[in-house]
Amino acid sequence: MEFSDNVNYVVLSNNADKKFMSKFGMYQVIDVLSFEKLKNTLEMFPSKRVVFNESLSVLSNKEKKEILELLNKQSIHYINVTSNVEDALFGDYVIVYDEDMKVLEGNRDVVLKNEKILKKLGFGVPFVVDLSIQLMYYDILDRVYFDVNNLLEALWN
């Protein structure tokens, strides 16, 4: 797989076994670590690209944001391989796999609007996306939101 150096990716996969992870062989892969160990590892990280293998899915949103701020500050881009669709909100570009077959690919906003395909694959859609889609059916909103704060602001206005 080839990845642009200036884009943060999320790869949604329910089967990220060793064979699947071998696709990222040229990048350093970080498996699940505690927040503190992950933070310490990234503070002295030698590369400008890292692959997380479910590493971020075990963190709280506050911890994820802190890790992503650290990566941004150090100009480190990431590929987050996860089965947690909520983590797709933190990426720029999303690639969705069913087993070893690529099913969807594109910028985050486009991929996450494919509610039927994501649900069929067992991922669903992030809560904020699902809620905004449902509110569009009732003409309460006129677009899909990807950030809960922006959604709340739109609802209050």
Image (spheres, rainbow, N blue to C red):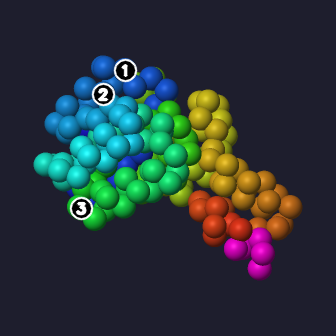
**Above or below for 80 versus 92:** above
Q: Nearer the viewer, mark 2 or mark 3?
A: 3
Residue 27 rendering spot, x and y as whole percentages: 20, 39
Q: Which mark is residue 17?
A: 1
**The magenta stretch spans residue 108:** no
- Residue 154 higher or lower than 68, as above or below: below
Q: Earlier in the sequence, mark 3 or mark 1?
A: 1
Corner quadrant of residue 85: top right
Q: Main secondary structure of the magenta part?
A: helix
First-in-chain label (2 vs 3): 2
Which numbered tag is attached to residue 21? 2
Which residue corresponds to the image point at 67% horizontal and 49% vertical from the top-left?
A: 127
Is residue 148 among the parts visible in the rendering?
yes
User: Which element is circle 1 on?
Assistant: loop
Which label lies toward us, 3 or 1?
3
- In percent of width and height, residue 109 lies at 53, 58
Q: Relative to residue 8, is residue 134 drawn left or right? A: right
Look at the image and give the residue range highlighted in magenta: 153-157
- For badge 2, the amino acid type reads Met
Query: Residue 45: where, in percent of width, then height?
Result: 18, 48
Residue at image position (63%, 44%) is: 125
Q: Secondary structure at mark 2?
A: helix
Q: Are marks 2 and 1 in contact (CB under 8 Å)?
A: yes
Quadrant housing the C terminus? bottom right
Residue at the disc numbered 3: 75
Question: Which residue is the extreme one toward the left?
Answer: 46
In the orientation shown, which residue stands out farthest toward the right? 138
| Viewer-nearest residue: 109 or 104 | 109
Q: Position of residue 10 (x, y in %)?
A: 41, 45
Q: Is residue 155 magenta?
A: yes
Q: Residues within 10 Å of mark 2 (few under 14, many from 20)?
A: some
